[in-house]
Image (spheres, rainbow, N blue to C red):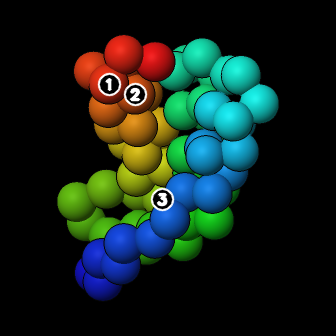
Amino acid sequence: MHSTPFRATAVEEAIASGANAKEASEQAAIGTEPTSDINASVEYRKHLARVLVKRGLEEAGL
């Protein structure tokens, strides 16, 4: 599996337009290209991206 960081511009745009943490985190998987392997499916990895972004935004006070 290859892990490549990327800038979540869809999340940034959602925040700039006034979205709350939950709404913005729904955009977290846009632009990702996770792979599926024996540890996790593509769907799970996209779900995890949304969950972790939401937690980070909430911790940041959004």
Residue 3 place in picture, x, y as percent: 30, 76
Mark in front: 1 vs 3: 1
Q: Is residue 1 left or right of residue 42?
A: left
Who comes first in sequence, dot 1 or dot 3? Answer: 3
Circle 1 crowding by C-alpha within 10 Å: few under 14, some 14–19, many from 20:
few
Q: Residue furthest left?
A: 39
Q: Residue beneath label 2, please?
A: 57
Instruction: Find out whether the residues at labels 1 and 2 contact each other: C-beta distance under 8 Å.
Output: yes
- In the displayed structure, 11 sits above or below 26; it is below
Residue under the image location 42 percent in, 46 percent down: 49
Q: Nearer the viewer, residue 46 or 37?
A: 46
Residue 58 place in picture, x, y as percent: 36, 18
Type of the residue with mark 2:
Leu
- In the displayed structure, 39 sits above or below 48; it is below
- SS for callout 2: helix
Q: Is residue 2 visible?
A: yes
Circle 3 crowding by C-alpha within 10 Å: few under 14, some 14–19, many from 20:
some
Q: Nearer the viewer, residue 23 or 17?
A: 17
Q: Is residue 32 left or right of residue 14?
A: left
Type of the residue with mark 1:
Ala
Mark 3 and mark 2: span between their CA atoms? 23 Å
Residue 48, quarter of picture? top left
Q: Which mark is residue 60?
A: 1
Circle 2 crowding by C-alpha within 10 Å: few under 14, some 14–19, many from 20:
some
Q: Which mark is residue 42?
A: 3
